[in-house]
Image (tube, rainbow, N blue to C red):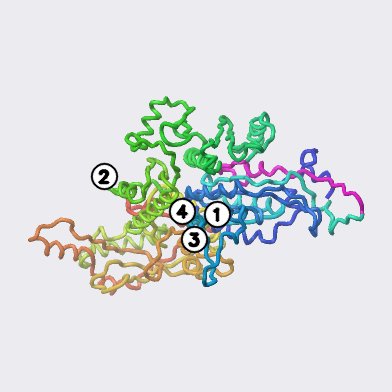
Amino acid sequence: MPDNQLLDNGQGVIDPDTYFETNSPPANLNEYDQKASEFVKYHGARGTPVVLITSGGTMVPLENQTVRFIDNFSAGTRGAVSAEKFLENGYAVIFMHRQFSLQPYSRHYTHSANGFLDYMTLNDEGKIEVNAKYAPSMTETLAKYNKARNNNMLLLVDFVTLSDYLFKLKSFTRIMATLGRSAMYYLAAAVSDFFIPVEKMAEHKIQSRDGALTLTLDQVPKFLKPLVSVWASNGLIVSFKLETDGNLLAPKARQALEKYGHQIVIGNMLSTRKRTVTFITQDSERVLSLDQEELDKDVEIESKIVPELIRYHRAWRNHGTLDSPYKVDIIEWPLHRWTTKGIVPPNQLIQRAEKRHPESQVEDDTELHTWVEHSVSRSMHGYIIGKGGSTLKRLKHETGTRIDVVKGEDIVKIKGTDENIEQARQAIDALVKESIDKAPATHFLAFPIQSPLVSRRLEEFYKILGSPSFKEEGITQDSIAPIPSLHITLGVMKLMGQMEIEAAVRFLKESVTETINQLIGERGLTVRLKKLDIMQGDPAKARVLYIHVQDESENKVDRMNNTLTKGFKKTASLRNQMMEAGLLEKEKRPYKMHMTLIKKTGTKPKHHTEGEEEEEEAQSESHSWFDARGVLKEFRGMDLGTVTLDSVHIMKMGQNKLGKYKSEGAVMLDSAL
């Protein structure tokens, strides 16, 4: 390729696309892509915010068969510490780090003054034990690490060379783009500014006998621009700027914001980077620093950076801007230490704060504890508060923390020691899980049936059921499925609030669509509705009458719903994918494709007098079943014809006055377009 084709503007900088065309991707890229895709799908379905953290330096080879290289030194401290802080605040983390640089949790031991073996000792039996001096801190660190890995909250990805880093950065940001504004990109890696293009690189080791070595390095393309505008256009993007001249820090940060169009630059000076940083946005600038007391206690500046970014990210997720709803910048708790530079008067700020933190009116909170934000859907806040606030009061008492349920936001704020906060997190998570387990299904996944032929034949069938000549005990008008509501159910779902609904719809549209459409091909999905049956039990006391769904499209429906799709490497079926994402409830019985026509859902009376008890129980029992023997005898072989399935919907339980279900979101099948 001629040199002039490598230049994008005559300044010797190649275009990012050209870089990828002229360099080979790392051998393990597909493996990590699959892991990242599964990780993002898992958390996208749950509405968990995800942050991609890049950390450590990149290496630039001088030869194709690399012996000599130029390295950007970075221990990766900022990235590793920040990852821990994000995890503690309920974020899922993809930690993309230089091989052998610092990693979250293990960083406490790999680059310490002590060698790793100094933390171990041999007991009298010759067995290895943790030195008692270090056991408490190691136990706490290990518990946090295990929680992150066991809960699938941390994905570790390594890189070595500049090319390795750039290919993975492009790939992972594109994968995370499916999360929209729920994604954050925390670009803390020390990326090389110069490199040697492949076509200019020596094949073998550069020989020292040839005398002095002169290198001509090309400038690395500016990858932040396509990252912001194409790869991760909706996420919150944070870059870093390191300077040695304080007068240049803010101007150069603003130049970067203007040039690339992202949201935040965190500026720091080489000499003070571990105790002071400056947050710079398009219209604000704020300095965060550790005071001497915090420095003496070995507090890390990342403990201030990460909560600040989470506040920005919450505003970005909710409103698409960096402004909070009240245009107020809260620096830290307790109340008397809050500062604001917004438009809200101080007295209103205090009033609002007291409403959100009523304990502040009665407590003298002079000791500054840690505040963390725990991600909890606002739909679950009522379960956490409990009747008259009883559950919340119990949680506070049992965990020794202060817990604020933030109205209108998907978070709970917890304050206390690290140990107590972790205890509160676990208690809240257990309470939420228990509440969801006990809750009834709210939605279902289904193929709606919209066929004039089926509608006409069912109308005739329903007329016969309602005629005076055909009387079957228990078959009432309200037990017959309205024609507008007819559907083939794939499974039921518990989506407790809008956040869960949006996550489920997003997962269906972005993570499952390709699987469906690759499978169905051009011929689509065709089923025949034929042969009546009851779900189980005695036909004389049936609860559900349904018609079988027979697959007439090369078994595609059955394959899509029940098996791993042949020919698609590790791609699960539609139902399996939704179940693995925690969106579909697992069936207690083997799944059976069907369309319900009659269903009885009688309930036991809630109130009765002693004399009416037996009569009401008998009435309740009779209302919960119907006699299907006559229907099956006369109509068992009924054939409603064939139907082409053209869409998959997430439907809300409960029909409207027209007998229809509300669709929260849908995927149109390619064959129907």
Tell me if mark 4 has few (under 14), some (14-19) or many (20+) residues whose alpha carbon lies within 10 angstroms of its own.
many
- Outermost residue, front side: 124
> In the image shown, does 241 or 504 lie closer to the viewer?
241
- Label 1: which secondary element: loop
**Sequence-earlier tag: 1 or 2:** 1
The amino acid sitting under disc 1 is: Tyr
Task: Determine the CA span between mark 4 and mark 3.
Answer: 16 Å
Q: Specify start and end residues of the magenta stretch as a single range.
A: 210-239
The amino acid sitting under disc 2 is: Gly
Q: Position of residue 271 (x, y in %)?
A: 65, 37
Q: Which mark is residue 150?
A: 3
Query: Which residue bears the numbered disc 2?
Result: 388
> In the image shown, does 447 or 104 lie closer to the viewer?
104
**Corner quadrant of residue 514:** bottom right
Residue 540 in sight: yes
* Tag 2 and tag 4, C-beta contact below 8 Å: no
Nearer the observer, disc 1 or disc 2? 1
Nearer the observer, disc 2 or disc 4? 2
Question: Left of 222 or right of it: where is 320?
Answer: left
**Sequence-earlier tag: 1 or 4:** 4
Query: Which residue bears the numbered disc 1?
Result: 105
Q: Residue at x 48, y 49 (%)?
A: 88
**Sequence-earlier tag: 3 or 2:** 3
